[in-house]
Amino acid sequence: MLNRHKSLIARVLAEGTGAAITVKPFVAGGRQGLKMWFDDLDEKHGPIAELKPYGLLTHRVKLTFGLFSSRVIAQIAAAQVEELVVARALVRSVATVSELTISGQALDSWSVTDGSFEVIADYRHQNLVPDSDEAVVITCSEIIVPLMAAMAELIGYDQVENPADSNIPEVEGGLSQATVSRRERNPRSRLLCLRIHGNICKACGLDPARVYGEAGGIIEVHHLEPVSMLEKPRPYDPEIDLVPLCPSCHRAVHTRRPWPLSPSELSSILESLRA
């Protein structure tokens, strides 16, 4: 039955990581599991996530590197500080919902230096059997997506510039505008923002999923401080620099320039209009 969900899992992984991913079921000890890797790197030349049942209610997810991954590991070692910040924050978000260890390294300071790098996360389901399709889909969303997204951030997938036809408001200043847009639209930054802050608009309180159901995946992420307005450069931290806003509120905060309205300012405006 797991084969039915391969395309769904692959799509969710692609949306969260910004890269195409192969999903392959396998059988270990008579129980079904999954292996996942980046399409362009294949199973031997990059990170591999393996999911399999572990005990009665738990999934064990193991992230390792293929035997011939030296080239991509060197690429990861050259990642920028801000990319490492995002990757570590994504892994920390996994540690909040699972028991996680990183091959003898600390959660806040790990790095990928060679092929011995390994992450193990044990995710316990409360009321689902690990062999069930539903449990597998949940584990993929909660554990594998952010882990593979962390690797995608370090590898450098999908560094997106603002497309010409985008309806996301621009921030004044040429280079800074592109930088802010890339950060806001980066799928890993979006994933991390929503894992930390949830899918509810910070200004109006709208939960699109409750209103629109399956069509409710419309929440956007907003960069609180335009780079063009920084007094001096500082490391970008998506845990504190991004917040979720509904599309209407996102456009509304950007009606003020160069400094956009803060979510709390817009919230106060909305409250005064309701009074």
Image: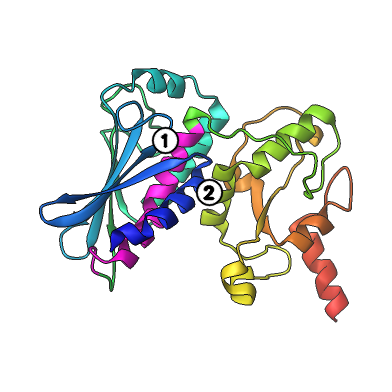
Which colour scheme appears in the figure? rainbow
Return the x and y of residue 69 as percentages of the image width and height.
33, 23
As drawn, is 186 to the left or to the right of 24? Answer: right
Return the x and y of residue 182 as percentages of the image width and height.
68, 37
Instruction: Give the position of the C terminus as an image quadrant.
Output: bottom right
**Residue 39 — which label?**
1
Residue 217 falls in which quadrant of the image?
bottom right
Q: Residue at (51%, 34%) from the top-left corner?
A: 153
What residue is pinned by disc 2? 15
**Residue 162 — which label?**
none
Residue 189 falls in which quadrant of the image?
top right
Numbered label tally: 2
Amino acid at pointer 2: Glu
| Span highlighted in magenta in the image | 129-153
Instruction: Give the position of the N terminus as an image quadrant.
Output: bottom left
Amino acid at pointer 1: Asp
Q: Is residue 3 magenta?
A: no
